[in-house]
Image (cartoon, rainbow, N blue to C red):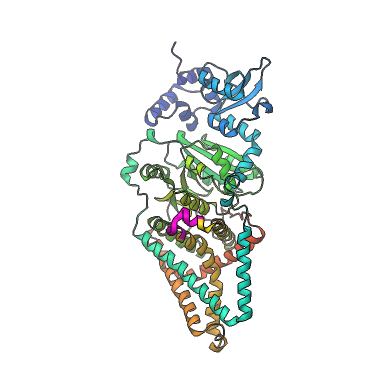
Amino acid sequence: MQRERLGDVLVAAGVLTPGDLEWALKVQSTTGSRLGSILVASGRVRRIDLYRALAAHWGTTFVDCTASEPDPSLLRGLAPERLAKELWFPLRRAGDGTVLVATALEPTRERAEAIEVALAAPVSLSVTSEWDIDHLLRRHYRDNLLDEASLGLWRRDEHRSARTVVTPSQRVVLVVALLVLIAGLVISRADTVAAVSLFVAVAFLASVTFKFVTCLVGARHEATVSVTAEDLASLSDADLPVYTVLVPAYHEASVVPQLMANLADLDYPAEKLEILLLLEEDDWETRAAAAASRPPETMTFVTVPSGHPQTKPKACNVGLFFARGEFLVIYDAEDRPEPDQLKKAVAAFNKGGDDLVCVQAALNYFNAEENALTRMFTLEYSFWFDYMLPGLEALRFPIPLGGTSNHFRTDDLRRLGGWDPFNVTEDADLGVRAAALGKRVGVIPSTTYEEANNAYGNFVRQRSRWIKGYLQTSLVFLRHPVELVRTLGWRQSFGFGMLIAGTPLSFLAVPPLYAVLVLSIILPPGRFAPYFPGWVLWASLANLLIGNALMIYVSMMGVFKRGLYGLVLWALLNPVYWLLHAMGAYKAVWQLLVRPHYWEKTVHGLSAAAPQLAP
């Protein structure tokens, strides 16, 4: 006998109108999605009502997993990864030894037999929702999830984890370098100061020149994974895969309404979106704000277990465990991506080949004109994402990912080991790790608009974390320099050294170089002669002036491309902006010594500007 259709079951149960069923069937004919997913995503049917109907449709019973506690003895030897993937969970044992198992997939005979092998017992399958399965996993495997999210990468690949900040061999190198410096100062203070000054000046200029040349190369290339209007038009909703959106949010109650509106604007079939809002256990304020904002049915609140370290990458690792999409993207709570960004990412992956593990969208700001700091921030991001990243890809250098709007193949991300929870710029680390495994990172022509920092203290806190993470990443990958060259090759190793290691060092060099400039102006030349011979002094000053001129030029380039002509002259303040970076750099070095894994929170929701897609 033919089984009654699910839609008819829902209509007969009174939870769906015939008109809504007709609408859902039309959507299904276009997208190829499951009818139940369409109805839940649209809000026409509650999740629990759908699964009650599915139980009847499949000829079995529905089980309320919140009504009683599962038997913990049944979980021994069961990997949570398997339960999450196969969507089943053992609940209790009956008097005859049969185990009642909740399943979110159709309880076929083949499925029952596979579960019986896993449990070594006969089973009786009842239906529940996938939300209930995930809830049981978060509750009963909390310690497992915390351990894997925090220590998984360290256990699998200890020398790629920033859990250890400085290795014993690195301590030896640092101590020897310090002793050599002290010995030089004792033997000949003037010659040592001159040599160090010259080295700092040349290194500063080399770092800036590297960025300048890379930006010029980037200016000659469009997005490295070109996505055309024809590519987007060729994508049908039926061909689009399930996409997971991870949104880590901590103390972000003020931007929750904006978050919900931004996610609602995504041009992607709602039933193919899996939105995981990652909330820390102690953040009741954000949780309450999110619950009160009428979140879409496609959004799941995922509680991140408290424990060291309390960082964004640890939260993302928890989200990765539950992710079921073929692709995955990270968005910050205040982000507003262009609506078609997910489709552009899918098109880029379709064209990019199997070695393309990630595509990065550009970041820019909706409050660029708010004050001097937001203008400088916009100048910096415009040149970085519009020229620097395409240039890095064109030159085949490792690409340090942005902390948001990076899109992954989910399975490849798991093979990379996820994020390093001990690295406070987990994005840069992951980009280098991908390159070390022969994977590529591309750039797509799409922008996500964020809130630029408009408070100077907030900026220094944010920048110190970023620079500390670059220092962590440098220390991690320089533990075994020979292996680094062997895995990355000379070209990419050079790019890694100039960008990841060179960026914080160039910021640290700014105050000494500025001091030399000021002292050379206000003090008599003879006072400098013992420590700065004429050629050293002039080389240092020339490098400082040329370096700042180059950075002013590339800052101007970025806003020209985006048509932000009113910001062009603000690039002349780049030397002052670098002093703010230097403050963050010296704070980063201090924190690296005393609080290496501390995640310094950036406060959002401070801007009075209204979020918009483009300035």
From what the image shows, is residue 65 above or below residue 373?
above
From what the image shows, is residue 17 above or below residue 504?
above
Residue 348's x, y, as percent?
38, 45
- Give the prevailing secondary structure in the magenta stretch: helix
Q: Classify residue 102 as left or right of residue 340.
A: right
Residue 614's x, y, as percent?
42, 53
Quadrant of the image occupied by residue 318: top right
Q: Which region is colored magenta?
A: 483-493
Residue 586's x, y, as percent?
60, 66
Q: Residue at x 56, y 83 (%)?
A: 531
Residue 336 in sight: yes
From what the image shows, is residue 68 above or below residue 510?
above
Residue 23's x, y, as percent?
41, 27
- Quadrant for the N terminus in the image: top left
Residue 127 in sight: no
Out of 338 and 383, give the one closest to the viewer. Answer: 383
Q: Residue at x 44, y 27 (%)?
A: 34
Q: Residue furthest left?
A: 230
Quadrant of the image occupied by residue 99: top right
From what the image shows, is residue 294 above or below residue 29?
below
